[in-house]
Amino acid sequence: MTGPGTAPAPPSKGGRWIQHWDPENETFWNETGEKVARRNLFFSVLSEHIGFSIWTLWSVLVLFMGPEYGLTPADKFMLTSMVTLVGAVVRVPYTFAVAIFGGRNWTIISAGLLLVPTVAAFTVMEPGTSFSTFLLVGLLAGIGGGNFASSMTNINAFFPLRKKGWALGLNAGGGNIGVPVIQLAALAIIGAGGGPRVLLGIYIPLILVAAVMAALFMDNLENVKNDTGAAKDAARDAHTWIMSFLYIGTFGSFIGYSFAFGQVLQNQFGRTPLEAAYVTFIGPLLGSLIRPLGGWMADKYGGAKISLWNYVGMGVATAVLIGASMEKSLALFTGAFVVLFVLSGLGNGSTFKMIPGIFQNKALAKGLQGEAAAAYGRRLSGASMGLIGAVGALGGVGINLAFRQSFLSYGSGTGAFVAFLAFYAVCFAVTWAVYLRRTTPRVPVTSATSEAKPQLSYAKV
């Protein structure tokens, strides 16, 4: 047994399973836990990074697909929408796969599965292939979106509450950066006169590297057990669905715009594939890099406060986009879009940090303390992350469908941006009303000798 100030024995490496894990114990964390957690974080980021690249693969491939492929702009938006949809749906089972197989084991499996859509795309990527074939192969790429959910659930269990904002932000940001990296790779290939199969040929060995690195250097946590009750409890909790809604506004925007930005530049401003590729990577790159900062700011100042004002910024940037779209100002449009990407990345970090804080507060309100409160928070926050990540990613589907309808109806993306502006206003209102609005505390109806229950407060979430 170990006391509060005693570090447990170093984790067992037999079979890469760690039998004891107590990150809230500062002695354990300083002497043993932090080094192990950081190592798992690094290789989790590598696998998730490539998963994001494969998920957003078709946002790049459509830039290669000129008139000879016979696809209309509406076809391309439909294709990217369906890829985003699959990525959102598979996040739910990927979340619980960590508890069934172990974080290390599932990272190996999920990385290896990325070979399927990559090899399939390499096989069919040529003029003359039917739209239905492209759509089917594109759907396979959606599994890359699931890597985020399993990675976040796994890393959430490794870090103490006081470090989760930074760790989850870095994990997600490193994954998100897979979007601009594949776009940069496409830019280099298009500029050199290469075809899409060159891009696909680069990623096949990288997938193998990610799977091997996970096998060699990651660990499974024995105390992360398969708990179907946690999934049910998370699904029944109203905060899971409130945070899912707010995450649509941040991550849904990030992934939706990542898929759509190049197509909007081509269809609305007449950019060539090379001209579009020159700028499409900038927004996702900056949005990915700033996500850890959003998590750090949330750790320091509170995720709800950062998220609230971030939605204000996103609304302002969207209003500028509407004006630039109506005035046909490419420079202003591009600049405002990049700012919107940056804010979506910042908000990704702050909203995701709110999740463990919310469930930790609920544990304290139930009267739990110490490890019991931490275990309750880990259990529900880990289960809810998959659901929140899945619903948030559905926002990317909505964005691409909104652009598709806007171009069909008006010949531009202006109508879609008006809808996005209204949505950010609602996100602002929900964040304020649920997590920041001051209310008069209710006086507990108890006798003078009875013990009052702790009051539930989200002021520091």
Image: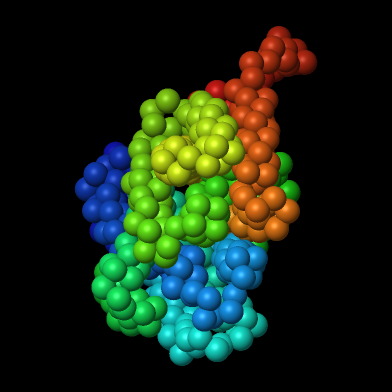
Q: Position of residue 449 (x, y in %)?
A: 69, 13
Vertical position of residue 432 compared to residue 280: above or below: above
Residue 188 on image: x %, y %:
28, 67
Which residue lies most toward the top here? 448
Q: Nearer the viewer, residue 289 or 279?
A: 279
- In this rendering, would 157 be left or right of 128? left
Query: In the image shown, does 67 or 347 lie closer to the viewer?
Result: 67
Q: Is residue 13 above or below residue 173?
A: below
Near-viewer residue (149 or 308):
308
Q: Is residue 297 visible?
A: yes
Residue at 55% over, 53% down: 268
Give residue 144's position: percent from left, percent from top: 48, 69
Q: How is the image coloured?
A: rainbow
Residue name at image x 60 percent, y 65 percent:
73
Residue at image location 49% in from the left, 75% down from the top: 65
Residue 3: image quadrant is: top left
Between 152 and 229, the residue placed more toward the observer is: 152
Where's residue 349, x and y in %?
Answer: 44, 42
On the picture, is 40 further left or further right than 341? Answer: left
